[in-house]
Image: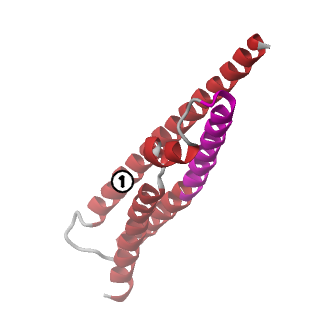
Amino acid sequence: MEENKKVILDFYLKMHQEQLTQIRHYETQRSTIVTTIIAISGALIGIITYDDNINKYDLHLAGFLILIGGFGISFLYKHSRRLDLQKNLVYDNLEYLYNFIQSFESIDTIKNDKYKEIDIISMRKWWIGLSAAIVLIGCAILLQILFF
């Protein structure tokens, strides 16, 4: 029976480790996409304003800027949903381990104190807001082209 408990404990510890690895992978993916979106957006804004004049020839670049910002918003929203799922799996796994070995602190303390870095709600708002700002810049340039 003791061997069976060790196997079960080892299984859940490996599962916990895999879920944390998956969370790190999602964060790396988010970082790469956001960096790419910022670089492309910066290049587009630089091309649009290169000649110190925003005119009708910059219309397609402003549209592409809006498209890239919209992609960033949708990707980051979907990505944050994945992180929420993984975070919940980590908490469920910790809860099972807590019940299994009875040597952890209460699960509420673990959720609130030790895993604050997994709580990404404020960071989600920041990254989605950054993509929304790119969309707004694109819209401002588009309005400048169309009406002025």
Determine whether 73 is above or below 7 in the image.
Answer: below
Residue type, label 1 = Ile
The reply to whether the magenta stretch includes residue 25 is no
Q: Quadrant of residue 122?
A: bottom left
Residue at the image point whose x is 44% and y is 62% from the top: 125
**In which quadrant is the C terminus drawn?**
bottom left
Q: Quick one: SS at disc 1?
A: helix
Residue at the image point whose x is 45% and y is 41% from the top: 114
* Location of residue 64 in the rendering, given as x and y in whole percent from the top left corner: 45, 63
* Location of residue 118 in the rendering, given as x and y in whole percent from the top left corner: 48, 45
Give the residue pinned by disc 1: 38
Residue at the image point whose x is 60% and y is 34% from the top: 19
Q: Residue furthest right?
A: 1
State which region is magenta.
Answer: 77-102
* Location of residue 82 in the rendering, given as x and y in whole percent from the top left corner: 61, 49
Q: Residues within 10 Å of mark 1 (few under 14, many from 20)?
A: some
Determine whether 93 is above or below 1 in the image.
Answer: below
The number of callouts visible is 1
Instruction: State whether the magenta stretch is mostly helix, strand or loop.
Output: helix
Q: Is residue 61 visible?
A: no
In screen coordinates, is 53 left or right of 89? left
